[in-house]
């Protein structure tokens, strides 16, 4: 099962390596990881998406907690939470596809960030399914490049 | 008054109560080495950095204090890795101080540069790279705190050369505040009460005690609990000595080379109480066959140990000593205690039946048996020695035949299984206890992995006694080849070229003795124990003697090969 885990860590060099090394060293799966500073500049927040049965994810949480640089671990499964991911998509644009691409972008509430004679670069935000669907629909036009942030998440309320 | 980084470092060590530093100098730590000469630390100059870490580890295990070693950057630091990993697996509190190239050269592939913090990240409890002399004191304070509290472990502090010369005012922080590190010490009271209920309902209970009993100093509490309830105790390799091996309620060690009665009792029990143990694969064998009929209680300070390999019914996170003390408090309120002990009679009778298998019996014929050597070592030291082991057959024979009665008396690499650990660890133990007998039970293979430390033992007049069980083989490898690889003894016959250990000892200025027949064993041991020198005893043993009982890897632990 898929779990989204929020981790607050000390904002110091080497902490990301400790977390990433924990996953690789113990054979835990890591689907995405995003990290950024919080309003408190001494703390960074990570959102990690991992997959495993309950026993494995319990171990993941405990092992993360055991790292001295980790301040707090919250497994969001079983909690009410919102999660979003952003993708930047560079898609081929020509006479035949331009209008359709813009229409799809509008339906997905995306934003065109850059226009060139041969391409659009589009920003789209949503949960993983939405981004997947968006990419699927743009495929026929010809996707040139994709950059994705990985999921970020917060509990509700 | 401003002080240099080197002075601050040493002042911190003083404040932490450090008495001994195991070290090996080099360019990057010369500012520290230079300063060290003015202080009254006991410095032990080893002959290889791996030896420094193992010696600090041995010192820590027997004394309960934090072991400290100091090495230079690059190869000095990378040579510590095996020692650090050894201490990490066995939860030994160490501070490993490594030199580092000056801060402006870090990342430049400078001479003798290694990213030692990166290299050791998975095998340290925590690590620090100190790039600012103003943070040095608080980092060192934190390092000692992290190493010695919770589940203990090695902490590495990487010290760039320039930082050791930078100056600042010294102020040692009084307390440590690490927001991400707050070990749980007291057990959860409702859980403890539930555990006691479960214990008093059981009719075939077994206590499975591990290294946590030794490191938390819980032996006395364990003894009170066990004698009060009359529950039999089996210990892991790391737990040996945590409960006296000669006690009538002792089942001996369990697992791959455990006793018949211990493995049978665990397999048949209806309640297993794990205390400071971690369900290691060498203990459990096939996991589905491990205590299959039992409810399980698990007491451990490390939450990650709980339900890692085996699902337990009642987990209790905390310090073993405190939790056992809490249990005893509640138990005194129970009235049915004595009756409970009596109700276990049928269980004890069953265990006595298993005891009759005499699984550790052996026949001493014309060739020296290793079991005989260890038994004589036990008898002639009255079970009071500190015993170090190397890894392999020697380790298992030591565990089976030296009946340890005291905690903090066994130095063995249980988790990592590091050959070459025992001798330097014994040196560290002898530094901690100059007046106690320290014996390293070794093989002819593993003793050669850190033999250079003979010079250290001679230099500092540390009369460690090494008993080499010399069979000309890497014996445990050979035993596995015999049983599982068609007796093809490939790469395991090291006896084809072996040093003359007696002359080797003499070359270092130590004392060498050899026993070639069973009658020699006792006189050789007596002579070694009389000598004020470090001694190598070369026992030429039965070359193809095996360690039994043995549970083949992956089998349930009641499937033992008995001979």
Image (cartoon, rainbow, N blue to C red):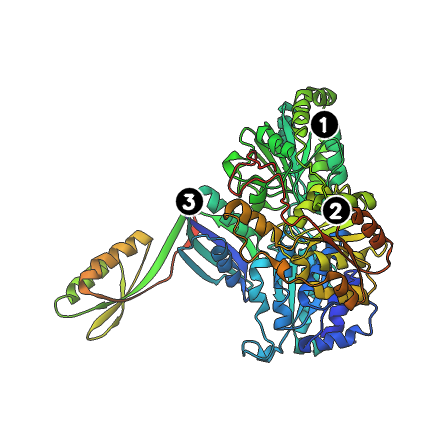
Viewer-proximal residue among B188 and B54: B54
Q: Which residue is mark 3?
A: A80
Element type at mark 2: helix
Viewer-proximal residue among A19 and B98: B98
Q: Give the answer, above or below, for where B340 lies relative to B460.
A: above
CB within 8 Å, label 3 to label 2 = no
User: Disc 1 or disc 2, which is closer to the eye?
Assistant: 2
* Gap in angstroms between the C-alphas marked 1 and 3: 50 Å
Q: Earlier in the sequence, mark 1 or mark 2?
A: 1
Q: Dot 3: within a 10 Å radius of its alpha carbon, few (fewer than 14), some, or many (20 or more) residues? A: few
Q: Dot 1: within a 10 Å radius of its alpha carbon, few (fewer than 14), some, or many (20 or more) residues? A: many
- Answer whether residue B519 is visible to the viewer in this image: yes
Q: Give x and y (percent) for residue B475.
A: 62, 51
Element type at mark 1: loop
User: Disc 1 or disc 3, which is closer to the eye?
Assistant: 1
* Gap in angstroms between the C-alphas marked 1 and 2: 33 Å
Q: Give the answer, above or below, for where B554 lies relative to B113.
A: above
- In the rendered image, the residue lying farthest to the front is B366
The answer to which quarter of the image holds residue B123 is: bottom right
* Chain designation of label 2: B
């Amino acid at each position: 099962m898929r779990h989204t885990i929020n981790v607050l860590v000390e904002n110091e060099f080497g902490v990301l390596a400790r977390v990433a090394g924990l996953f690789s060293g113990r054979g835990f799966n890591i689907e995405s990881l995003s990290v950024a500073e919080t309003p408190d500049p001494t703390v960074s927040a990570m959102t990690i998406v991992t997959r495993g049965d309950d026993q494995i994810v319990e171990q993941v949480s405990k092992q993360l907690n055991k790292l001295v640089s980790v301040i707090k671990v919250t497994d969001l499964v079983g909690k009410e939470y919102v999660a979003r991911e952003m993708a930047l998509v560079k898609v081929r644009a020509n006479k035949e596809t331009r209008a359709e691409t813009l229409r799809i972008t509008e339906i997905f509430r995306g934003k065109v960030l850059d226009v060139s004679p041969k391409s659009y670069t589009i920003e789209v935000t949503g949960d993983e399914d939405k981004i997947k669907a968006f990419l699927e629909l743009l495929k026929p036009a010809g996707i040139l490049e994709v950059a994705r942030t990985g999921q970020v998440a917060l509990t509700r309320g | 008054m401003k002080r240099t980084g080197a002075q601050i470092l040493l002042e911190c060590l003083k404040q932490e109560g450090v008495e001994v530093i195991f070290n090996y100098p080099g360019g990057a730590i010369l500012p520290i080495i230079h300063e060290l000469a003015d202080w009254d630390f006991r410095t032990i100059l080893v002959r290889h950095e791996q030896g420094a870490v193992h010696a600090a580890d041995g010192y820590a295990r027997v004394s309960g204090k934090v072991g400290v070693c100091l090495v230079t950057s690059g190869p000095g630091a990378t040579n510590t890795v095996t020692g650090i990993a050894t201490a990490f697996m066995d939860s030994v509190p160490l501070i490993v101080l490594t030199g580092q190239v000056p801060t402006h050269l870090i990342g430049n592939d400078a001479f003798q540069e290694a990213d030692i913090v990166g290299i050791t990240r998975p095998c340290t409890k925590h690590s620090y790279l100190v790039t600012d002399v103003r943070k040095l004191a608080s980092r060192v304070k934190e390092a000692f705190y992290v190493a010695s509290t919770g589940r203990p472990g090695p902490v590495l502090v990487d010290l760039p050369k320039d930082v050791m010369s930078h100056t600042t005012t010294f102020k040692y922080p009084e307390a440590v505040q690490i927001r991400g590190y707050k070990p749980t010490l007291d057990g959860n009271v409702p859980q403890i009460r539930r555990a006691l209920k479960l214990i008093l309902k059981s009719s075939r209970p077994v206590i499975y005690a591990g290294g946590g009993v030794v490191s938390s100093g819980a032996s006395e509490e364990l003894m009170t609990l066990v004698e009060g309830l009359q529950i039999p105790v089996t210990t892991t390799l790391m737990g040996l000595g945590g409960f006296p091996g000669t006690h009538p309620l002792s089942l001996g060690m369990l697992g791959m080379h455990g006793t018949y009665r211990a493995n049978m009792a665990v397999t048949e029990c209806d309640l297993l109480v794990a205390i400071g143990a971690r369900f290691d694969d060498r203990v459990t064998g096939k996991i589905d066959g491990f205590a299959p009929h039992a409810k399980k209680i698990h007491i451990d300070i490390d939450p990650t140990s709980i339900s890692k390999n085996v699902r337990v019914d009642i987990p209790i996170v905390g310090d073993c000593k405190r939790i056992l003390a809490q249990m005893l408090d509640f138990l005194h309120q129970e009235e049915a205690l004595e009756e409970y002990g009596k109700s276990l009679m049928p269980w004890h009778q069953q265990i006595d039946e298993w005891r009759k298998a005499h699984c550790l019996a052996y026949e001493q014929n014309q060739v020296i048996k290793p079991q005989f050597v260890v038994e004589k070592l036990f008898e002639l030291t009255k079970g009071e020695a500190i015993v170090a082991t190397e890894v392999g057959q020697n380790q298992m024979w030591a565990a089976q035949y030296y009946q340890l009665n005291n905690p903090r008396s066994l130095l063995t690499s249980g988790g990592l299984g590091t050959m070459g650990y025992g001798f330097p660890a014994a040196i560290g133990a002898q530094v901690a206890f100059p007046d106690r007998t320290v014996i390293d039970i070794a093989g002819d293979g593993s003793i050669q992995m850190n033999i250079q430390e003979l010079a250290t033992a001679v230099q500092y007049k540390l009369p460690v006694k090494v008993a080499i069980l010399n069979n000309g083989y890497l014996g445990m490898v050979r035993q596995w080849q015999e049983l599982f690889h068609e007796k093809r003894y490939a790469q395991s016959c090291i006896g084809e070229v072996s040093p003359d250990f007696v002359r080797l000892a003499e070359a270092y200025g130590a004392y060498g003795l050899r026993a070639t027949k069973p009658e020699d064993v006792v006189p050789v041991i007596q002579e070694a124990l009389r000598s004020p020198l470090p001694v190598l005893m070369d026992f030429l043993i039965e070359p193809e003697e095996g360690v039994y009982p043995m549970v083949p890897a992956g089998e349930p632990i009641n499937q033992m090969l008995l001979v």
